[in-house]
Image (tube, helix red, strand yellow):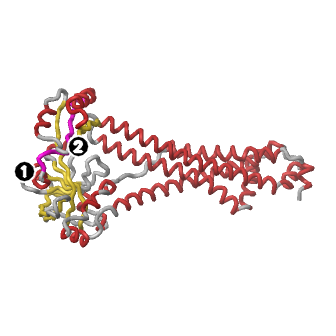
């Protein structure tokens, strides 16, 4: 008996029971789609986080103050004297809303010198305009999502050369007009919220935020081998009053978290495949019962036990292959759909209309605090990553699970006695 005949007999039964076959394949599709969609999501988010952290450089040490006063010029001098450090970069941040082109957008106010911005971002890429001057005169460089907010359907609402009104959170609705000198290209997910930021010179930011201190200091070690030593030196100096984190630690933490999430998703998808296996076994046992008479006829005309066993295993194989392929396609579609939903959810975190922003100004900026809570989400930017190995494993698992589920029904069919089988009508 040829392989072609075996597969034809297997396919014939699946074709005759189309609804039952479709439901059985669907169980496999759900399990495989879960693996592909969830793993591609975690891989995409992980890659985005890794790219963002690596943009800081492997020698970066990030200091955040756990005390209310923040960092001062004395701290900058002290950190600059630490051995094996090449740069000390102060950063000042605040929250606010910017009104431009009829849109009110929640933003992060970032104070940093133009040279330090170059070191933090690696390269400063402009969509329009150029860099501000490091003077006390306020002039702003806008992040891409500020100039092209989702609330305006991605249309440009701010341009170089036109003024914009900046409302600062926590200053009783204080507002001032800033000239826009530059608009950055999109940087995607970043440790510093560049895309949703209004970036100013440090003196201008200190003036607007009424702060003489800094929220964050980034220290650059001279090389990768001195990073841990410099970080420990800083910890010894400041103790618990400062949180010290290296880029390497952030990468390790991110990898650990992503790995744990991936394992959880694999377990969930595995449960789906176990349920699918039980369903396949149940359906194939029903198929054996329904085809008992047919099996008796096949055996009476010369089919061996091995032929019957192969026919039913081939049926399980077809279910696994079709379910696996359709599951991969469905998983890819679901993954892109989840990404689109994440971006859509992020877009809804911005202030929806200019009218609501105007009310916020008259009421003393009361709405700004609520908008700032979700600013992190509005900076979410990633694409799913489909690894060939993961896709291959998903397909192999679907086939193996289907074959395992079909072993007992196939064995039972092969052991039917011809005489007993022919008696079944």
Asked if residue 215 is positioned above or below residue 105 in the image, the reply reads above
Q: Is residue 152 magenta?
A: no
Q: Residue furthest left?
A: 136
Disc nearer the start of the sequence (1/2): 2
Could you say which is closer to the camera, residue 70 or residue 306? 70
Q: Nearer the viewer, mark 1 or mark 2?
A: 1
Write down the residue under mark 2. 122
Q: Secondary structure at mark 1?
A: loop
Left or right? Give the position of 298 relative to 77.
right
Write down the residue under mark 1. 135
Q: Which residues are magenta?
A: 211-223
Residue 36: x %, y % from top left:
51, 49
Residue 24: x %, y % from top left:
67, 56
* Residue 208, quarter of picture: bottom left
Residue 288: x %, y % from top left:
79, 52
Left or right? Give the position of 159 relative to 133.
right
Q: Secondary structure at mark 2?
A: loop
Q: Is residue 212 magenta?
A: yes
Q: Give the crowd class for mark 2: few <14, some 14-19, many >=20 residues within 10 Å.
A: few
> What residue sits 89% from the left and 46% below the top?
417
Asked if residue 91 is positioned above or below residue 179 in the image, the reply reads above
> What residue sits 28% from the left and 42% below the top?
55
Callouts 1 and 2 close, C-beta under 8 Å: no
> What residue sits 75% from the left and 49% below the top?
312
Q: Give the crowd class for mark 1: few <14, some 14-19, many >=20 residues within 10 Å.
A: few
Could you say which is closer to the camera, residue 172 or residue 64? 172
């Amino acid at each position: 008996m040829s392989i072609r005949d075996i597969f034809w007999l297997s396919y014939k039964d699946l074709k005759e029971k189309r609804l039952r076959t479709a439901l059985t394949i669907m169980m496999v599709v759900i399990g495989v789609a879960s693996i592909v969609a969830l793993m591609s999501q975690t891989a995409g988010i992980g890659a985005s986080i890794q790219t963002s952290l690596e943009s800081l450089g492997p020698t970066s040490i990030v200091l955040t103050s756990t005390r209310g006063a923040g960092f001062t010029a004395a701290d900058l001098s002290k950190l600059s004297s630490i051995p094996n450090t090449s740069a000390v970069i102060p950063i000042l941040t605040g929250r606010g809303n910017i009104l431009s082109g009829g849109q009110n957008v929640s933003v992060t106010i970032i104070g940093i010198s133009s040279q330090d911005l170059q070191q933090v971002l690696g390269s400063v890429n402009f969509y329009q305009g150029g860099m501000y001057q490091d003077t006390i005169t306020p002039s702003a460089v806008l992040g891409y999502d500020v100039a092209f907010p989702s609330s305006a359907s991605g249309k440009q609402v701010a341009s170089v050369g036109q003024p914009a009104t900046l409302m600062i959170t926590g200053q009783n609705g204080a507002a001032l007009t800033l000239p826009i000198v530059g608009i950055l290209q999109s940087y995607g997910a970043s440790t510093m919220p560049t895309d949703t930021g209004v970036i100013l010179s440090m003196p201008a930011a200190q003036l607007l935020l009424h702060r003489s201190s800094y929220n964050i200091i980034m220290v650059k070690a001279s090389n990768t081998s001195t990073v841990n030593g410099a970080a420990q030196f800083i910890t010894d100096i400041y103790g618990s009053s400062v949180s010290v984190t290296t880029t390497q630690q952030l990468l390790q933490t991110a990898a650990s978290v992503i790995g744990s999430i991936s394992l959880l998703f694999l377990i969930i998808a595995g449960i789906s495949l176990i349920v699918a296996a039980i369903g396949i076994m149940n359906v194939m046992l029903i198929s054996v019962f329904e085809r008992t008479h047919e099996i008796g006829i096949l055996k009476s005309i010369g089919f061996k036990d091995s032929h019957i066993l192969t026919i039913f295993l081939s049926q399980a194989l077809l279910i696994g292959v079709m379910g696996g392929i359709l599951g991969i396609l469905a998983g890819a579609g679901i993954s892109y759909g989840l990404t689109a939903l994440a971006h859509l959810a992020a877009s809804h975190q911005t202030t929806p209309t200019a009218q609501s922003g105007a009310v916020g100004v008259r009421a003393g900026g009361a709405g700004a605090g609520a908008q700032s809570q979700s600013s992190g989400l509005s900076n979410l930017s990633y694409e799913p990553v489909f690894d060939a190995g993961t896709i291959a494993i998903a397909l192999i698992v679907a086939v193996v699970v289907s074959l395992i589920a079909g072993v007992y029904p196939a064995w039972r069919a092969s052991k039917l006695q011809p005489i007993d089988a022919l008696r079944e009508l």
